[in-house]
Amino acid sequence: MKKILSVLIPALLMAGTSHAAEIYNKEGNKLDFYGKVDARHLSSHDKKNNGDATYVRFGFKGETQINTQLTGYGQWEYNIQGNKTENDAADTATRLAFAGLSAHEYGSFDYGRNYGVIYDVEAITDMLPAFGGDSYSTADNFMTGRANSLATYRNRGLFGLVDGLDFAVQYQGKNGAAGESVNARSKVLSQNGEGWGGAVSWHFGDSGVTAIAAYAGSKRTGDQRVKTFNNAKNAEAWASGLKYDANNIYLAANYAETHNMTALAGNDSAVSDKAKNLEAIAQYQFDFGLRPSLAYLQSKARKNGQVYTQLKYIEIGSYYYFNKNMTVYADYKLNLLKHNDAFVKARNIKTDDILALGIIYQF
């Protein structure tokens, strides 16, 4: 069992569907179903972060062999909050929904709701039991996280010529205000104009070391220029990271800058002129199932010539894997923001620590 866990656990952390249940595999057609129940409780002096935070997440991955060189594929993933009463309005969301074609060493192309290329870098540190991934990456914020209208080309091994050299090119169509596109956005911060991005990573042989970098630039919508206290025509982001994953040790760090893109903390409509973000994580996998975690995250935003620290915390936590299906975890967020800081006070940004405890069943 110890040897099995030492192989399975890193794979489960890095690929959420690696433990999917195969429900069909015949004549070149395959369909896997995956999901998890995360029974989570939060404890904090902040009432908004205190209480039940249980959720259910499930989806499928499918592929079909078209011929010897071409494979079709698709993925859909859905999230349902489990901490609402039966009389409350449903709190659900489609996280992923895309389909595409893969041609082996020639790469793959897909379109739909997927991860933006900037998240290629974010992913190496977004591995905490309950927190993390929140300094510059968020859903529906250009190409920093999950988003709509993404057309993505990916190639592994540079057309089969260079092992370990992977790259991606991505286009995002407009997600504008009402009347501007089919998939209109009521929230101005979730809008985006047309944009392009790319990412490249280099795996240094069997050393466990990977270097990665990404860039994305987009137009901003008219609504965003008028309603976000930021009149810039364009938004952009770049990120770079380095990770080591070998010998039961996981170390990773990334640095990113966003321009005219990241929301100013404590304001649902204001966008910073620039944000500088740093994330670092260290984990160790014990053979008996314990995986302690230590991380540091920080985001500094610039607005009208002033610089504000709007996110800063240390994470101390751990997973414990009973087997590939059952996990318990504890995660403590030590908030380093000061309640008497003028920026923090003016925007009523929370400075409380948070403890998350949970048990996960996954398949």
Image: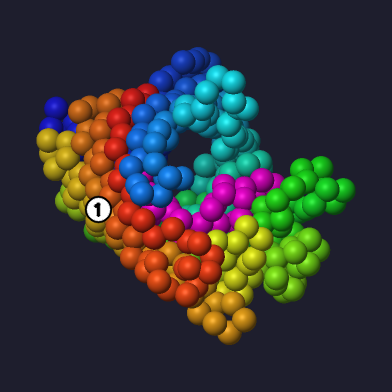
As rendered, which of 184 and 312 lies closer to the eye? 312
Q: Is residue 148 magenta?
A: yes
Q: Is residue 25 magenta?
A: no
Q: Is residue 101 above or below residue 63?
A: below
User: Please, which residue is most extreme toward the right here?
Assistant: 179
User: Please, which residue is most extreme toward the bottom here?
Assistant: 305
Residue at screen point 52% across, 23% down: 85
Dot 1, crowdedness within 10 Å: few (<14), some or many (≥20)? some
Q: Secondary structure at mark 1?
A: strand
Displayed quadrant of residue 65: top right
Q: Quadrant of the C terminus?
A: top left
Q: Which residues are magenta?
A: 122-150
As rendered, which of 14 and 300 lies closer to the eye? 300
Number of marks present in the image shown: 1
Residue at screen point 55% across, 77% down: 302
Q: Is residue 70 above or below residue 203?
A: above
Could you say where residue 39 lies in the image, as x and y percent from the top left? Answer: 36, 29
Secondary structure mostly seen in the magenta stretch? loop
Q: Look at label 1 and name its amino acid.
A: Ile
Q: Quadrant of the N terminus?
A: top left
Residue at screen point 50% across, 62% down: 348
As rendered, which of 29 and 243 lies closer to the eye? 243
Q: Give the residue pinned by disc 1.
A: 316
Work out whether residue 228 can be spotted. yes
Q: Is residue 56 left or right of residue 19?
A: right
As rendered, which of 176 and 347 lies closer to the eye? 347
Displayed quadrant of residue 87: top right
Residue at screen point 30% across, 30% down: 359
Work out whether residue 277 can be spotted. no
Could you say where residue 186 lies in the image, as x and y percent from the top left? Answer: 74, 47
